[in-house]
Image: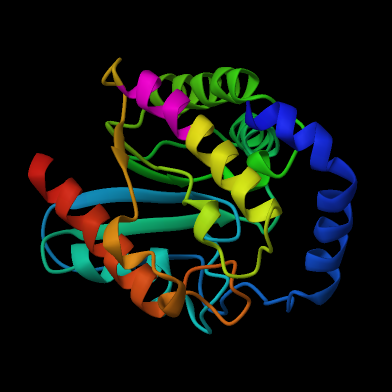
Amino acid sequence: MHNVIFILLLPLMFIQGRLVKKNTPKLPEAAGERVGQIGVGPEVSLLVLGDSAAAGVGVNRQQQALSGTVTAGLAAHFNVSWQLLAKSGSNTEQTLNMLKKKHHQQPFSFDIVVVSLGVNDVLSPISAAQWSEQQSELIEFLTSEVKCRQLILTQVPPMGGFPALPQPLRWFLGKRSDEFNQQLNRLAMSAQFILLDFGAALQPEFMAVDGFHPGAKIYQEWGKSVVDTILLKY
């Protein structure tokens, strides 16, 4: 039904989309190291992978972002060798192609992989079913080629709550993100990965100034959820 309404409201939402792109502040990716080693204890390797949220857009430093909060949380338990591979605007297909290219040039492996993808796919014309196929391919590559032993994916954030989006565009993208998450939940039944959501921390007042990306509190809660999930296994 929301696709029918989308067609009817397409001219308005097209204009809204252009205005959002024009008027939303363009925030940079968080500054700081994207590879390193931290902590004491058993050795474990970690890859943080994905889009602008993985890259820390919305905070100033990587220490405040997802990679920083996860590595800091793990450092009390492990000697963590970590790497961040993330780029603003990346979708699932682009991320998978980047991984394949890097792996072909120099094969690598990680014990744990944390993935943040989906928002840019929701913003694209791809269907939820097509996206699910791409996610399946990414999961297969990470588990079989990258040798990941623990794979953690995060749900697409509820875009119907993004302050930067006007109505009815916000409503439509909220429905799209819900549809994409339904596909993720179906994939999760195969138990190839652990699926997290943002939980109560994803509230408008805790988002970045652009109304589109996580703020420091969301990154903190997100990172803590990832660390707690990892510690359940190790």
Q: Toward which corner of the image does residue 216 lie, by quadrant?
A: bottom left
**Residue 116 image point, x, y percent:** 48, 48
Q: In this view, does 80 lie to the left or right of 3?
A: left
Q: 104 or 166: which is nearer to us? A: 166
Q: What stretch is highlighted in magenta?
A: 181-188
Compared to 48, does 144 lie above or below?
Answer: above
**Residue 18 image point, x, y percent:** 87, 60
Q: 182 or 39: which is nearer to us? A: 182
Specify whether residue 234 is in view. Answer: no
Residue 187 included in the magenta stretch of the image: yes
Compared to 123, does 59 lie above or below?
Answer: below
Q: Which residue is drawn at 60% across and 60% down?
A: 52
Assign the N terminus to one quadrant of the image. Answer: top right
Q: Toward which corner of the image does residue 22 lie, by quadrant?
A: bottom right
Q: Residue at x 58, y 55 (%)?
A: 86
**Residue 137 image point, x, y percent:** 54, 19
Specify whether residue 118 is in view. Answer: yes
